[in-house]
Amino acid sequence: MSAIGTETPQRGSTADRRLATIILVLMALGLVLRLVDLGTRALHHDESLDAWFSQRFLDDTYEGYDPVYHGPLRFYITAGFFWLLGLSTTTARLISALAGTALIGLPWFLRRQIGRAATIAIAAILCISPSYLYFSRFGREDAFFAFLSLAFFVMLLAHLQRPRPALVVGLLVTLVAAWAVKESVFLLVLVVGSFLLVELSGELWEASGGRPVGSGAVLIGAGLAVLAFVLGEPLVANMAWWGALLIGGVVYTGVRARRAGVAAADVPVLRAVIAPGWQVWVLAAGIGAFVFVALFTVLFRTSTGANTASTPWNAVFDGLFGGWDYWRSQQDVNRGGQPGYYYLFVLPLYEFVTIGLALVGIRRELRRSTLVGRFALWSAIVSLAAYSYAGERMPWLVVHPLLPFVLLAGLGAQELWERRGELRVGLMAGLLGIGVVVTVVASFQLSYSRGEEPRELLTQAGQASPELAATVERMYDLDRLIRAELGRPASIVIDSSDSAAWPYVWYLRDLDDVAYIDLGAGDPTPGADVVVAVARNVPLVEPLLVDHQATVQPHREWWVPSYTAAGPTDWFRWFVDREIWDETEVGSIDETVFVSPGALALEVRADDLLAPPG
Amino acid sequence: MTLLSAIFLVSCIGVGVGVTGYLPMVLRVEERLPIAAVVGAMAVTSTSFVAIAFFDFSGGAVVVGTGAAIVLAAPGWRSLAPTLRADITDFGRRLRAGWRDPASPAPLLGLLAVTWPLTIRILSLAYQRSPTGGVAVGHLSVFGDWQAHLAYAGSFAYGGDLDLTTPLSAGDDLAYHFGVDLFAALTVPAGLSVPAALTLTTGYLAFALPALLYMFGRRLFERRSVAVVGTITFLAAGGFGFFRFFDDVADQGWSVVWNLPRDYTRDFDTLWMDNPVLGHLYPQRPTLIGFSVVLIALVVLWSARRSGDRASMAWAGVLVGITPLFHTFGWGTALVLGSIWALTDAVAPNGAGWRHWLWYLVPATALALPTVVWLLPPESAFRWEWGWVAGDTPWDIVWFWLWNTGLFPLLFVGGLVWRGAVSRRVAVAVAPIWLWWAGVHFAIPHPWVGNNAKYAVFWWLIGSFVVAAVIVEAARWAARADPPVNAFANAAIALGALSLVAAGGLDIFKTLDGTAGVYPATVVTAGEQLVGEWARAATPADSVFVVSSSSTSQPISSIGGRPVVTAFDGWVFDLGLDWIGRAEASREILAGGPEAIGLVEEFGVDYVVIGPNELAAGADTVYWDRSGTLVYDLGGFRVYAVEGIV
């Protein structure tokens, strides 16, 4: 069970230096790709919320963790960027860009276990893949969480190989940081914890003289996990029997190993627990607890917490239990309306190169099992099952179940590299080359030109339209004009129905006279220079604004495809030019922007004046 | 920052690296890169200046200029190529060696880890949206001086100022070291606004300076600790003004820390030297290049004077020779101090002789001379005046410098005589900088007396490392002393060192806060912004405007990039131009009447702007409604075309 890899380049060797250079170049490229035009795409609904909470922390008005909006750590960090660089769409997304860049560098620490080709392949995929590039330019927590997840695994692997006190502290602090970023930490713990049980069983089995099991235990355990998730509710019961089987395996092999006189030091998982000593574990737990309390008490500023419906306890208990409680309560909501097989479509449609290479990697793992391979295989199956089971299936969550597939893809690339002389491999490499070109094109289109396009599967759910961003600019221009000419701020009314107040709340933060009102509840618009009403409220306000200029624009658009209704030809058409088979499936919340005659006249006057001569 | 502007700045560094390839001196990576950043910016600006003369100001001209600089730097790259990889490997090795290793760059990286974020924070506050829809600024530097720099940079970027006339006083020569503003303008075709261009290029140059300060300290004083302490001593320098902080605490309690009510290094009454960052580097952008050039040149000369290496001397000579375009004070300092070193070598019994110095002095003088002559104001304001603003008596002067710079002069003198702190060779080399200090007490070269601080600051710059050497050596002595002497000594040293940076530290802290005092303060109202944008978009580039000269915030030159008959009185006065005559002419034109017609013709006026400042200065809208053609009327501003009234 302890086979770990294929190459062990010497530290400081020429090969090592060359590899370091390649990884650094990929990181530099990744940084550029993430920073270029970072602020151009209109803000997604969730991005604007994250930015707003970060600003609140900066202004000392953030009240504490609320699982509805996920963990607070990225608010603190983004607030730091705001302080340092100012408030903007770019700085709101900076944490993702930097975490996504740092993520590219992490495979370096696995190079001795996975080989050089695998290291380069993983870094390259993390650099350029559509999912990682797009969500590294997206102001939510997912790129940051992916970074913490892989960092946790890198440290865990290092600790299993050579236990060190610093790694114990690092592991617990990283886990706490991940806890303070996103509730997906429960799935991370589930995946890693269950893997350690399976790995321990295998190690004990082999140490007690059993036949090498390779990936066998992983496949059986993961298969049972899939069964448990497919059976679904009651999840606790299904997780219980699955967990009991895993623990039973450990007990059985443990008894067997004990009878065989196996020393704990000969079993890597046990050694990793025992070697640091209990004092180190206590110290690490203390540090972890301190960091946890600091993060969930808004750096010791509140003990009561946010006091919302989803945080009924105090700050620490909210942090400990609030996330799980809320996550469980949302299981039936199925926000996003995506089916259970959502990731089985999205992953291959965007990440076909990664998935293709991962299949080669799985084949390699099944033949020559390694610790990294077992972990990646286990994580790929269990994560995919867990994320597919979870009630909320969203595009940005793709990066989490994809991560172990990226590791497997690296192993696949290593396999191809090692067998590069074979004709069959040459043909595969040719196909791979074509796939890479198509992937790069798709990735660039997604990140730089189609980031607001609802027909992209990764952009759905809450992405504001470019028209909305243009309207925001117009509002600022109008505010300046009205202030200059009339000495007062522009009066703006935004309809808060259908959550349409976001992302305006963040965008219009610098304007003084903005009201967010449910326009379905009456007439709150007299004297307003600009009124934005969502489609269903337009009939109510339109008669009151007959002299206004009215412009209809999409607030946000989405596409929830009927996956199984489309045939291969439909999917091919979508793949080639994003042509969809049923345009009626594109949904939107439209809004109408009403501009008062006075404001409009002022705007026209200014436009006439500012027009270049001739 | 746009991708193109980032590529431009990276190109500048690339050019700079190539230019350092002409320098035979062995440089470490952490020395080569900051030198390259500054030298590259100067090289690209110089070649682009020539390209603009041929092709007009445009993105194409910038590309040609940058390309020419790349071509000129290419042989340097070729000569560096064999060693560059080894240098990078060596940097990695030294970094891994641990910070105690004498060759470790860790102290420098630590220094940059502090200075760079502070720089970013200060610059991120430079321009903000004002609550009333205009532009607010985060510091006096931007409220005042940067408005003029906007005008200079804008006159290139938006006005294509090829005839080199000043936008602040239409028709007069651009007698100002405008290089750093032209450098900023070069980024405008890459998609930046002029304010963003000033901010970005200031950051670019400010990133390099701490590394150059560190290099200077390490090279001359041969101790990393001196390099670090010297850099901090200079950047956070201030005097005893921090005593006023205790008054403020006594008056308002400790919460005053979060809203510091005043500056502790400047009041233009008794405090004139200001903090080097906030009073020199931030507002006076040319200093970012001038200080850097002085440090680079002195390091190169220091190395070359030992070896007699002519190529290094010539390299430094060319660098200093093109410096007047960027900072005349820096050129003068490098040239005069170099000349003194040459003289020392010539007369010293065991000196290296003087002939190799010609390789430095000739290009440093000959290349500079045309620019220096061009920069001379039409009428010299030079005058002899004893005491400067310090006072008449020796005691006044002693008190002035103690108050403005704290213990600095005492420690500086102490360092020059304490052989344990500073070697005799270094002491002899840096001692002449006291001439800069002495000079300000009897010579006033500029119209405004306050400008003498621009000379004295070089004394602060060089002396900071001598003072640092004293602090470091004293600390070493204290570490060897027996208790309780060591405890008292350590406390005294810590207090002494703190006193050197307390006032400057408070002022920097106040700037970082961003909300202390009157800041952020509106510099341009919404109406001013609109009329400035209109001027840029809707009027020919060579149009001349009349505005009131009472405020730094007039938008025609700062936002529009168009020349005005006279901008803010203080600026024009400071340039040695006829500010009184022009201010009077502007007032008369605004007021209308028969005199206005002649003055309009005399100054080639195309447009008359009447806004709140002009109305306060007596502008007559009735006259101009009748006599001019109203071409703009928005946001409280009316602009009249005057064509045809003559």
Image (cartoon, rainbow, N blue to C red):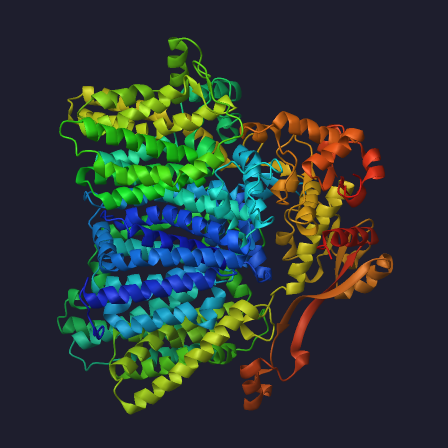
The residue lying toward the viewer, choosing from A215 and A485, is A485
The quarter holding residue B560 reads top right
Establish if A472 lies above or below B480. below
- What residue is shown at x 72% (from left), y 29% (from top)? B587
In this rendering, the count of numbered labels is: 0
In the displayed structure image, the side of residue B474 where residue B113 appears, left or right = right
| Quarter of the picture holding the N terminus of chain A | bottom left
- What residue is shown at x 75% (from left), y 51% (from top)? A609
Establish if A563 lies above or below B168. below
In the displayed structure image, the side of residue B586 where residue B222 appears, left or right = left
The answer to whether one can see residue B219 in this image is yes
| Quarter of the picture holding the C terminus of chain A | bottom right
Establish if A613 lies above or below B136. below
The residue lying toward the viewer, choosing from A318 and B450, is B450
Residue B138, image x, y percentages:
54, 37
The residue lying toward the viewer, choosing from B416 and B602, is B602
The answer to whether one can see residue B213 in this image is no
Residue A339, image x, y percentages:
55, 78
Residue B9, image x, y percentages:
43, 53
